[in-house]
Amino acid sequence: MTSNAKGALFALLSFGAFATHDVVVKALGATYSPFQIIFFSTLLSFPLVTFMLMRDRTPGTLIPVHPWWTALRTGAAVINGMCAFYAFTVLPLAQTYAILFATPLVITLLSVPILGEKVGWRRSLAVCVGLAGVMVVLRPGSHPLSSGHFAAMGCAIFGATSAIIVRKIGQDERPAVLLLYPMAANFVVVGGLMVAVYKPMPLPDLGGAALISMLGFVAGLCLIAAYKAGEAAIVAPMQYSQIIWATAYGWFLFDEVVDRFTVIGAAIIIASGVYIVVRESTRGGSSQTPVLRTRSRGYGSSFRISPFLRRTNAGN
């Protein structure tokens, strides 16, 4: 098996685990507030992250080198998590993923003011086409947009903001700083918000929160292995395999049927996203790679992979 094939396989395993992670979020969301799910999944992630950080030999303290950017990223990650968990709770899985697939498009847009990147007309056109695909999924005017739709759009925007800030400050900040600050903020902020909506969790449901943490951790390790083995242009598009998992899970577990407009819109978004990834990969090792260098998955509530991807790719 070639290295790219291994990378693609690890990526498919990773995003399959992430999709299962989101299914558990949706299942628990039928009973509990997203705040409570985020709080307990964050709490139960700390032991896993601690073991991971034991291997971090980067010298320094946990004081950020860029405190204001770190604070902005932390806030974006917290809001991103709340939006994502809520969207998965109230929207069909496939529709949620279709909207979240716009995240690389937003990253490309944000790379101009934040990173000073130059986005040519081809990528600009791809972004416009992708955003048009989002409009196909949402179909504004044909039916009222729900809070879940706005939450999914917020997740894409704040997730892109968090990712692009990692790209900006990631070479200076320790992975421990990038990893722990959003988790600590979730523990405090979401813990406070949870007080008003808390419901006692029996052991099986608490096990579900632990499963969310474990799936995020295992999926993150698989994604690290994927980027170690394969080229970014091969691995990155594998994230779109989640739409297959979402369709299958939604049909078997939640009686969800994917409508025609979601399929068409998702196809447009995926095509534009793949084009941007391929386009950037052909530009070589220049700095003009905001999507390929900001790949990450996670909602600030459990194991976040982007800081460790930065380290593993630095040695490639």
Image: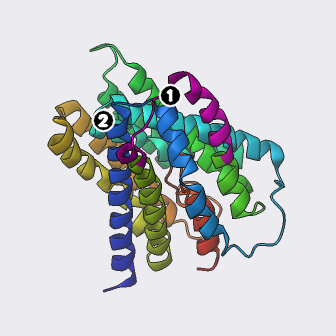
Q: Around disc 1, counting alpha carbons within 10 Å, would you say few (fewer than 14), some (14 to 19), or many (20 or more)? A: some
Q: Mark 2 points at which residue?
A: 95
**Up/down of 188 relative to 149, above or below:** below
- Residue 198's disc is 1
- The image shows a total of numbered marks equal to 2
Q: Residue at x 81, y 42 (%)?
A: 68
Q: Quadrant of residue 230?
A: bottom left
Q: In this view, does 246 lie to the left or right of 259?
A: right
Percent coordinates x, y for residue 201 in the rendering: 43, 38
Q: In this view, does 27 lie to the left or right of 228?
A: left
In the structure shown, which secondary structural element does the residue marked by tag 2 occupy? helix
Does residue 205 belong to the magenta stretch?
yes
Q: Which of the image's four quarters has the N terminus?
A: bottom left
Magenta-colored segment: predominant secondary structure: helix
Q: In which quarter of the image is residue 13?
A: bottom left
Q: Which of 100 and 61 is in front in this view?
A: 61
Q: Which of the image's four quarters has the C terminus?
A: bottom right
Q: Which residue is drawn at 55% across and 45% down?
A: 107
Whether residue 207 is visible, yes or no, is yes
Label 2 amino acid? Gln
